[in-house]
Amino acid sequence: MLARISRFILTLLLCIIIAFPLFYCISMSFFTNIDFTDAYAHFLPSHPVLDNFRTALQNRYYPRFIINSLLTSALTAIGRTLITVMAAFAFTHIRFRFRQILLIALLGTMFIPPDALLYPNYRTIAGLGLIDTYAAIILPSLFSASALLLMISSFVSAGQEYYDAARIDGAKDSVYIAKILCPMAGSVVFTLFLQAFISSFNSYLWPLLVTNRNSMRTVQVGITMLGFADGGEYGAQFAAITIIVLPFLIILGLGRKRLSEYLSGEIRL
Amino acid sequence: MKRRELKAFAYIAPALVMALLFSYLPLIRSFISSFLTISQSGQIRGFAGFGNYIRLFSDDAFIRSIGHTIIFTLLFVPLNTVLTTAAAALTRRKRKMSPVAEFIFLSPMAVSLSAYAIVFSEMFRGRISIINRMFSTDIAWLESPGTAMLVLVILGVFLDFGIDYILLLSAFRSIDKDVIDAARLDGAGPMQSLFLIELPMIKPMLSATVFMAIKDALLISAPVMVLTEGGPFRSTETVMYYYYLEAFRSGNRAVESTIATLSVSISIAAMAAISLRRRHARKDF
């Protein structure tokens, strides 16, 4: 009994700690300015207002930031999925020279932290004349070694027999990939797509470096520069954050089961 | 060369081009540049030998940034490991309320770095902060060196919490039920079962998350940038933040290429340690 109570209390305590910043952010998005400048810090708005959400959405750049983020994240996710599926297909279905070496070379990029190569990569993008373009934001994250590893391991289990049968029937590779292989590995393909989308949406450093114009900023970079606080509109800042966090919370809530199954599959690799 | 082989190369070409363009070529470029003297405009002035490395290690700001990075790592890794392991251990059995707790422990995954950083700077802002009210303290957290580092560590824990939690939770839940039942039959209580049987069994995953945490901690830069900008009094300037400042603000090519080379080497060593450990762990079973 004592063990149960202490377990409950510990869980509750940890939940409160972990949930607090998010709770406080959502709470602050309903604050009035007086709640922020008061002599003591408020937990909850003295009287909740929706003005902050209106201010955020009426900001000149905020909606544009969101559109930039959605577009670059979608393009990154689509591009990465295509590149990964194609490469994984070649590695699992075709025998070719240098196969082993090329695979090691591609997976080896896992060892190279992109943060340590920010500057040379920035120079590459600048050299290509791509600063302030979507391409600059997208290009370096198109290939992911861990995505390739996962895709290969799910394609391996798909089985060669289907491919041989499809080839005998005269199906093109593209048809086989789209109609048979991807549906069979559906949940992994989908999870990789989602993961690429979320990690791209949430990335901060790289988009910050390769964009200068306000109209090209992504939302993660943009929310640090909205300048609501300078205009005395403190709450709008947190409304802007709440708006972008909520959809991901919902996705996470819906995909929680799938996620842990998928990850426990990864561990057994 | 057969047609099928050409086809295969065509399929992997995009992945290969990306890996070359954004990983291998810049890595080689940094490595070579680190032994050269290069002017700010990018012209090669000559061979420098280990001159750039020697100069880097005689720079006080760099040495201090190593110190800050080590302090961050020493605080972050244990705190992160204890909290995520505790969360996973507490929710490892499916109970009535566990979906709620699970969702809360996963929720940090939905929040980005810049979002957390903005919320944290408000939570710890000045003396009239919500944290001071909660703990009845009177500390300007982000304005004095020691406490600013502490806030940075806490922010770091939140950033990695979700992914580490789910990895450990999946490891706990993939333990064979028979083993746990057998232990219970032998009279092991829940604490004994956890510490003597389950934790040793998830050791491979635990050490993998610890190594990942160490690697993340040694390479930390973006949270510093958004939360403290290295301050107050450059007390939270980490190695990778110093890299960022030197490379992008001062255009210092020597510092940029040497730090890049060093940090890639450290990362490779850390990852090699993980895979060696994993192989070792597999042998044990």
Image (cartoon, coloured by chain):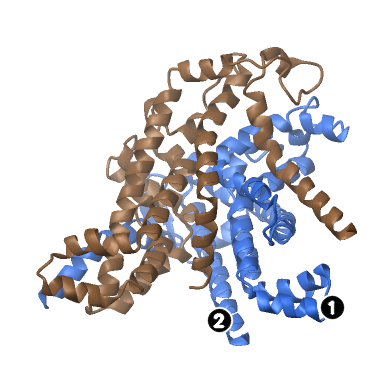
Chain colours: A brown, B blue
Amino acid type of the residue tagged 2 in the rendering:
Arg
Where residue A87 appears, x then y in whole percent? 28, 65
Q: Are marks 1 and 2 in contact (CB under 8 Å)?
A: no
Q: Residues within 10 Å of mark 1 (few under 14, many from 20)?
A: few
| Residue at point 81%, 20% (across, down) | A40
Location of mark 2 (residue): B279
| Residue at point 28%, 55% (across, down) | A82
Q: Secondary structure at mark 1?
A: loop
Chain letter of the residue beneath label 2 in the structure image: B
Where residue A86 appears, x then y in whole percent? 26, 62
Location of mark 1 (residue): B187
Where residue A39 appears, x then y in whole percent? 81, 17
Instruction: Give the camera-side residue of A110 and B39.
Output: A110
Instruction: Give the camera-side residue of A20 and A264.
Output: A264
| Residue at point 22%, 78% (across, down) | A96
For the N terminus of chain B, give its image quadrant: bottom left
Can residue B61 be seen in this snapshot?
Answer: no
Task: State how far apart marks 1 and 2 are (Cα).
Answer: 33 Å
Q: Residues within 10 Å of mark 2 (few under 14, many from 20)?
A: few
Q: How many marks?
A: 2
Q: Specify which label sits upstream in the sequence, 1 or 2.
A: 1
For the C terminus of chain B, give its image quadrant: bottom right
